[in-house]
Amino acid sequence: MMQKMDALSPRGCGAGLGRSARATARLEASLALFRAGQEPVGVAEALRSLGFVVWQQGAYGTATALFEESLALCRELGDRRGIPWAIVELG
């Protein structure tokens, strides 16, 4: 599972290389797969990663909504690692 998470991070998708459109597409596909597979931890991670990438693109409202959904899911799961990350992303 952790290899999946690392590969689906913004950096792992190429966002840091100026390929944010490609990263966005990959993260959206990943999010859909995690939702379909009912993997809530993956969903929360994909939401947070996607939020980071769209924030870099200037879509602040969309990013905030993604971070908030990630935070709500992390709280529901009791994800002690994911909760602080989502809060940090919300600023």
Image (cartoon, rainbow, N blue to C red):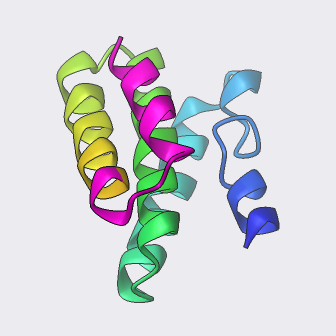
Between 62 and 78, the one nearer to me in the picture: 78
Which is more toward the observer, 47 or 26? Answer: 47
Q: Nearer the viewer, residue 5 or 10?
A: 5
Residue 43 appears in which quarter of the rendering?
bottom left
Q: Position of residue 27 (x, y in %)?
A: 52, 54
Which residue is farthest right? 3
Does the magenta run of residues contain 13? no
Seen at 40% across and 49% down, the residue is 47
Q: Residue at x 31, y 43 (%)?
A: 71
What quarter of the picture does the C terminus occupy? top left
The x and y percentages for residue 16 are 72, 24
Residue 60 x/y as whole percent:
26, 17
> Quadrant where the N terminus lies?
bottom right
Image spot of residue 5 (x, y percent): 69, 59
- Horizontal placement of 64 versus 57: left or right? left
Question: Quick check: is 83 in the magenta stretch?
Answer: yes
Task: In the rendered view, tell whether residue 22 sits above or below residue 32.
Answer: above
- At x 73%, y 67%, the residue is 4
Decide: is 19 above or below 49: above
The answer to which of 20 and 80 lies nearer the viewer is 80
Which residue corresponds to the image point at 76% horizontal and 24% vertical from the top-left? 17
Q: Which residues are magenta?
A: 75-91
